[in-house]
Amino acid sequence: MARRNKRVQPEQRQLTPKEVRLNARRRERDRRHWTIIGSVLAVAVLIVVAGILNEFVIKPTSTIATVGDTEIATREFWDEARLEHNRLQNQLIQMRQFEQQFGSQSFLMAQINELQATLSSPFALGLHTLDRMVDRIIIRQEAEARDITITDEEVEALLREEIAANQGAVTEPQATSTAEAAVEATATAASWTPTPVPTADASSTLTDTETLTDTVAEVPTPEPPPPAPLLTEEQYQEGLTELVDNLGSGSDLDLDDYRALLRDRLLAERLEEIIGNENLVTTEEQINARHILLNIIEPQPEPAVEPTAVPEGAPTPIPTPEPRNEDETLALAQELRQRLLDGEDFAELALEYSDDTGSAVNGGDLGWFGPGRMVPVFEEAAFALEEGEISEPIRSDFGYHIIQVVERDDARPKTEDVLMQERQMAFDTWLDEKVAEANVERPSDISARMPRDLRNIAPVNLVPPPVPQ
């Protein structure tokens, strides 16, 4: 039997006391290092977890503002801010489309600039959103106090109207209302007698006390636009699906939340109608006037390059008017006034000379208007005139006016547009007062309280799709 080789184990050396102390010190140092590393990692994990909890659990449920005893949760504010951001973007695209169609009108540019400023600033967008939420709470409270309610059927009807508008269609109630309005308008037109428009008799000299003759202006009847198609159930369901997708892509709102927003809108409309009519005066002193406007025309700078020849067949460019300083403009105004007093036709002179192109084609006619519709200096002079009287040249920021009052009425009914504006102004004033009276607390750091995706907004200048030709 073979003899096994036994491995000889080396004899373990006894550590010296110094080595024992060094090993113990090294183990203690390593233990401290690992303890520190573990503590740092634990703190980092806690910070991350705390940040996640704060961002997704604590902050969304925290209160961002209060209106009296009513709290606005941060999550509600976030959802509303995203929804408002999308709404303002769509509104800006619409304004840009109007600009393409009608040119850079001053009122359009003012709205475009305001929308761009709001969309480009987290602070402005947040404040705008919060103000709208505060307004809705005030309106809800007032509606409840006045026992004003909105039914589910009214909310559903408004939702259908919105979807129909997006589909280029109308709902059945809208179509019925339009048809009834068309029948009423046709009946009114059939029985309507044009209102005589007094004009000066060219055969006589016009004085302050002259009697005016009546002539009837023929008004062409515009062709009615083609009726929009009725909203089908299939279109409605497609529109609902698209709305839900749009709500979910930008916020945590669902269809029930959107219906609640529509209910608030209907409450505001109902309350505006009630408050707007409480002290509404439906008649006012009005005058029917016409004018000739003469602009002061400054000299145009010399062109840097020679103008190119107009190609054959191209439309002839509008000639640049000759310069006319203030003295020359006043002299022309005085000359025209004298010609009117000598019996020349006001409408013909307005068509030939007036720089107010909108009224010149109508003989300078401005129609009926009440106080507050014209610039103050023009209004003061016009309301001081008697019927048939022609004013001295009146200076305004637009130039010199020659004004004639054709008719006066001390209690003429206001137009529906004017009444609508006055109702809106009365409601806005009431709402501003209610907000001022309420104990509203807003955050000072509203930019930092915005949702993450809206805290840093790039400048906005949305380009609309091309307008179909």
Image (spheres, grey):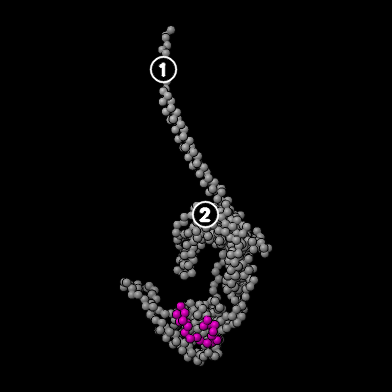
Q: Can residue 120 be spotted in the picture?
A: yes
Quarter of image, res 138: bottom right
Q: Which residue is drawn at 54% across and 85% down?
A: 385
Q: Which of these two is toward me, 224 or 214? A: 214
Which residue is at the far front? Answer: 17
Q: Is residue 4 above or below residue 234?
A: above
Which residue is at the far top? Answer: 1
Check residue 248 for magenta coloring: no
State the image coordinates of residue 95 (x, y, percent, origin top left): 49, 65
State the image coordinates of residue 384 (x, y, percent, origin top left): 54, 84
Q: Give the range drawn in magenta.
A: 380-401
Please give the count of numbered marks on the rendered protein.
2
Which image quadrant: the N terminus?
top left
Label 1–label 2 contact, CB within 8 A: no
90 lies left or right of 189: left
Q: Residue at x 37, y 78 (%)?
A: 299
Helix, strand, or loop for circle 2? loop
Q: Which of these two is toward me, 295 or 135? A: 135
Query: What crowding class fits label 2: few (fewer than 14 Cα within 10 Å), some (14-19), or many (20 or more)?
Result: some
Q: Which of these two is toward me, 151 or 273? A: 273
State the image coordinates of residue 362 (x, y, percent, origin top left): 50, 80
Quarter of image, res 139: bottom right
Which of the labelled discs sits on residue 449, or is there none? 2
Callout 2, which amino acid?
A: Arg
Which of the marked residues, 1 or 2, is nearer the chain's N terminus? 1
Q: Nearer the viewer, mark 1 or mark 2?
A: 1
Which residue is at the far right? Answer: 147
Q: Mark 1 points at which residue?
A: 11
State the image coordinates of residue 238 (x, y, percent, origin top left): 57, 55
Check residue 383 for magenta coloring: yes
Q: Label 1, label 2: how many angstroms apart (C-alpha)?
A: 72 Å
